[in-house]
């Protein structure tokens, strides 16, 4: 059984064909706990870490820090998760994300870093200073851990014992001021042969940061960005035009759902012994609505399940009602009823042990499957 939040997404095909992305967990889909508060990136997102700041992890599994969050609203560029970092504040506060590579980079080989950013709704400043530090190990240790300053500079890095690093900036930076679409940051470089880790953020001080005022809404100026789809790929051919890829005309924020695969909703919720959808469930179902609207050749089947508590007759009735509630929501959203089917299985198809509360929780679920007409 696979969940909606661990689906496989199509590999991005660039101007020169398929290339291997060396970044582990490149779109932050793999995590240990669904975030229920800000600052839950550290020790939670698999194969990623942070420095001194409290980097945010935004995932649509969460009711509080999902696509609607403390700094506004944005849909993930791909998948159901992204990172959120402060890149500028009046007091010099900074946040960063640290990633790791599947393999060490080859000396003298050309690579390209890309990642996508979107300025948060409530941010007042846009910046152009996104850059990346490659290193032979994660940037950590007493120098950063014990420091009260969150801004990382060359002086900070030079004090870390055994750290070998290089700092790469964009060849032609622009202001990343869009709050609607995801804009691409594009950094080509030639590897030195030691690189196994990298850190993304703004390494410039406030006085050196290139910034643009985009809003007068807040008294305190700050810049906060969402980050998604980080990639490090070998590119030996001539580089494509920067701006053609840097400012996409249309954001590709809709996840790719495989056909004929059964997925389990993570956030489709009901009150005990009832079949009325809670408001928190709508965001997740809206994703499916978008997919169905964009492809008229697709249809969907909804499956309701319960735990083994109660009579078989009542569980069968309840599971059918809950599956129908999801189906009705899709139909009310404009999807042709002939493309939507539902069925309840009661407690007949458990996926876990019904003798434990944890197992019963897993068994109380609603699933779906996309079908090609």
Image: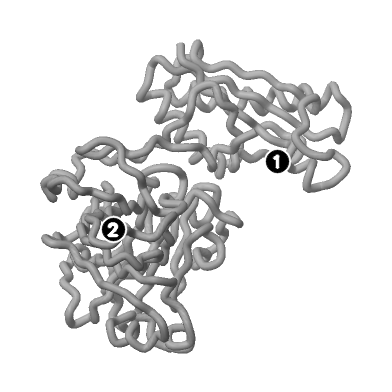
Label 1 with label 2: CB-CB less than 8 Å: no
In this view, 352 is above or below 166: above
The kind of secondary structure element at disc 2 is strand
In this view, 82 is above or below 314: below
The answer to which of 40 and 9 lies nearer the viewer is: 9
The colour scheme used to paint the residues is one colour
Which disc is residue 271 wearing? 1
The kind of secondary structure element at disc 1 is loop
Q: Quadrant of residue 164?
A: bottom left
Residue 286 drawn at (x, y percent): 46, 34
Q: Residue at x 38, y 46 (%)?
A: 75
CA–CA distance in space, label 1 to label 2: 36 Å
Q: Residue at x 44, y 72 (%)?
A: 138
Q: Residue at x 72, y 29 (%)?
A: 305
Which disc is residue 119 wearing? 2
The answer to which of 231 and 311 lies nearer the viewer is: 231
Q: Is residue 40 left or right of residue 88?
A: right
Which disc is residue 188 wearing? none
Q: Nearer the viewer, mark 1 or mark 2?
A: 2
Q: Residues within 10 Å of mark 2 (few under 14, many from 20)?
A: many
The quarter of the rendered structure image containing the N terminus is top right
Q: Quadrant of residue 143?
A: bottom left
Q: Is residue 252 left or right of residue 83?
A: left
């Amino acid at each position: 059984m696979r969940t909606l939040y661990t689906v496989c997404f199509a590999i991005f095909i660039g101007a020169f064909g398929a290339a291997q992305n060396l970044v582990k967990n490149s779109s932050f889909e793999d995590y240990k706990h669904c975030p229920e508060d800000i600052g839950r990136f550290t020790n939670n997102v698999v194969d990623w870490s942070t420095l001194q700041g409290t980097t945010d992890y935004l995932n649509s599994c969460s009711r509080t820090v999902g696509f609607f969050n403390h700094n506004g609203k944005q849909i993930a560029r791909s998948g159901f998760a992204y990172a959120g970092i402060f890149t500028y504040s009046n007091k010099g506060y900074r946040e960063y994300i640290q990633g790791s590579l599947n393999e060490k980079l080859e000396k003298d080989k050309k690579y390209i870093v890309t990642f996508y950013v979107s300025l948060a709704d409530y941010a007042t400043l846009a910046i152009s200073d996104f850059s990346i530090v490659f290193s032979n190990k994660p940037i950590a240790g007493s120098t950063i851990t014990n420091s009260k300053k969150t801004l990382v500079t060359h002086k900070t890095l030079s004090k870390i014992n055994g750290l070998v690093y290089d700092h790469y900036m964009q060849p032609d930076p622009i202001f990343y001021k869009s709050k609607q679409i995801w804009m691409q940051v594009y950094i080509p470089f030639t590897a030195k042969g030691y690189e196994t880790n990298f850190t993304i953020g703004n390494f410039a001080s406030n006085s050196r940061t290139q910034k643009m005022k985009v809003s007068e809404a807040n008294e305190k100026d700050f810049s906060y960005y969402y980050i998604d789809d980080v990639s490090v790929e070998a590119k030996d051919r001539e580089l494509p035009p920067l701006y053609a890829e840097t400012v996409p005309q249309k954001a590709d924020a809709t996840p790719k759902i495989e056909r004929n695969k059964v997925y389990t909703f993570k956030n489709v919720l009901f009150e005990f012994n009832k079949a009325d959808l809670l408001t928190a469930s709508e965001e997740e179902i809206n994703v499916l609505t978008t997919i169905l609207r964009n492809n008229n050749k697709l249809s969907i089947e909804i499956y309701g399940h319960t735990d083994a508590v109660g009579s078989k007759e009542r569980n069968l009735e309840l599971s059918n009602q809950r599956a129908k509630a999801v189906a009705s929501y899709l139909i009310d959203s404009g999807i042709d009823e002939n493309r939507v089917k539902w069925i309840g299985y009661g407690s007949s198809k458990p996926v876990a042990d019904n003798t434990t509360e944890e197992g019963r929780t897993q068994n109380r679920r609603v699933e779906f499957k996309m079908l090609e007409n």
